[in-house]
Image (cartoon, rainbow, N blue to C red):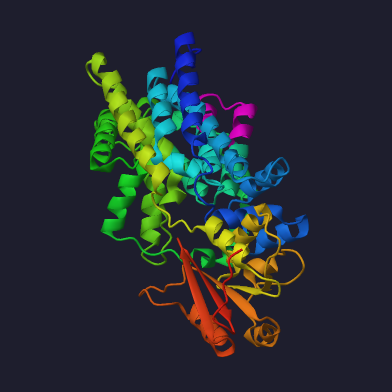
Amino acid sequence: MKAPDAPASGLQLSLLALITGLAAVVRFHALADKSFWFDEGVGVAIARLDWYNFARILWRREANMSLYYLFLRGWLRLSGSEFFIRSLSVVFAVISVPVIFLLGRKLFDARTGLIAAALLAVNAYYVQYSQEARSYPLMVLLCMISSLYFLKSLENPSRQHRALYILSSVLAVYAHFYSVLVIGAQWASLRLLDRGRVPGETKNDWRWIALGIAPVGAFVVTTGAGPLRWVERPGWRELWKFAIEFTGNGGPILLLACVAGVVAALIPAWRTWRVRRVPWEDWKYRFLALWLFFPALLVLVLSLVKPLFVLRYFLASLPALLLLVACGVARLRRPVLIAPAALCLIFLCGRGTVRGYREDIDIERDDWRFATRYLLEHAQAGDALLFHVPMGRMPYEFYRSLSTAGSSPMVLYPHHADHITFLDFVEKPDDEQLKKLLPQHPRVWLVLNHAQGANGSPDARSQELTQMLEILYPHTELEGFLGVEILLYSQGRDAITNP
């Protein structure tokens, strides 16, 4: 077994502090430049619910990321600006940098840990999701802490190490359900470690973890894959694109460099590949390989039946990739080449990050900021408002709460009470009731959010709404925004008035 870690030197700590500072700078830069997209708006709306409705929406539909929503509830008490809300993710992401250093030092040495920390600090894909009001940085952080204490428990199965391993593993699953795949990779890796190195206490650890995540299992069995019905089955072109983005959005050169680093790292394990159980020095490579590949490969197989593959859901495997790449770089035969090789990788990652400030990597961002501003600036007293997707109301309500506009339309759908409730997230349309309410309003706004079907034509619900409104209102005006279309239905042609 690996000897206990020596304390980090002053130089190592100084370099780690610089890398952590770099991680903070690249994430706080331009943090509020982009509009909240659909998922961010929905997440903030969930966190703003009262406790009763908060618990109901989690159990009915949004249990995934529930731990993040709890953190966000407290965070929102301090400020409600875009910058501050997103800064919670930045905090989790910045903390993850020293944690990957500790992992690298535990598995290999401090030099490998520093290289991995630098790569994580500037990885464009991780930077993008560190700037979103979503749970992905929290998931990555908790999965790394879980893996760190998984290793510590193997080395020294003390009550403290095991308790922290169980706690971090359970919390990781509540941060994002796909974290259970990382826990599964840990469990599978023990089947490859020399039996004498596996403490007997680990059996109880798995029981406690299973008990802790049992409510997640109940939710999945009850809800099924309904919340993921929008996911499409990936083809080879999509998988290639995923690989480019996951490695840092640096193009084929960065992807090939990362592949070379992983191969160089795994070479020592090749000599024992036919042996099922191996000592620690060989096992650690298998552990990282399982952490990196097992979640994605398992979901790809399951996607043959039901598409479940979403690249950002596998961010928890990114530390394993970067640790292997860092190990491959640190293993260069000539030490003089290590620094240039690491700097080259950092440069390629940084270039992808700079591009990421201008355009998103793998999401279709909807511009709710300007769509809401336009709607509120042109709304008149007595106007009504309908949303094509019920949860599209949530990002609108967020930006409405920041607006100083004097009036806003009356929301007819989704609408259940004078304040947002869990039913407004999942309410089924009642078109007969809408037909009774619409004539009371001289103008009606309809907000469409990504309303195109698979063939590019309007989806069924948007067609139903537009047909209903066209019967009552002869004149229509359209304004388009990124991912959002706003239609105004009225009796006359002078419907839009400048504020």
Q: Is 368 in front, or is 375?
A: 375
Q: Start and end of the magenta stretch?
A: 148-165
Visible in this render: residue 242?
Answer: yes
Residue extending furthest toward the top: 10
- Residue occupying the point 55% across, 37% down: 90
The stretch drawn in magenta includes residue 268: no
In the rendered image, which quarter contains the N terminus? top left
Across and down, in percent, residue 64 comes to 58, 54
- Residue occupying the point 43% across, 27% down: 117
Quarter assignment of residue 421: bottom right
Across and down, in percent, residue 303 comes to 39, 62
Quarter assignment of residue 490: bottom right
Visible in this render: residue 285?
Answer: no
Residue extending furthest toward the bottom: 471
Q: Is residue 420 above or below residue 284?
A: below
- In the visual, does 349 lie left or right of 183? left
Q: What kind of secondary structure does the magenta stretch mostly adopt?
A: helix
Across and down, in percent, residue 467 comes to 52, 86
Across and down, in percent, residue 87 comes to 58, 39
- In the visual, does 317 lie left or right of 154? left
- Residue occupying the point 55% across, 30% down: 95
The stretch drawn in magenta includes residue 162: yes
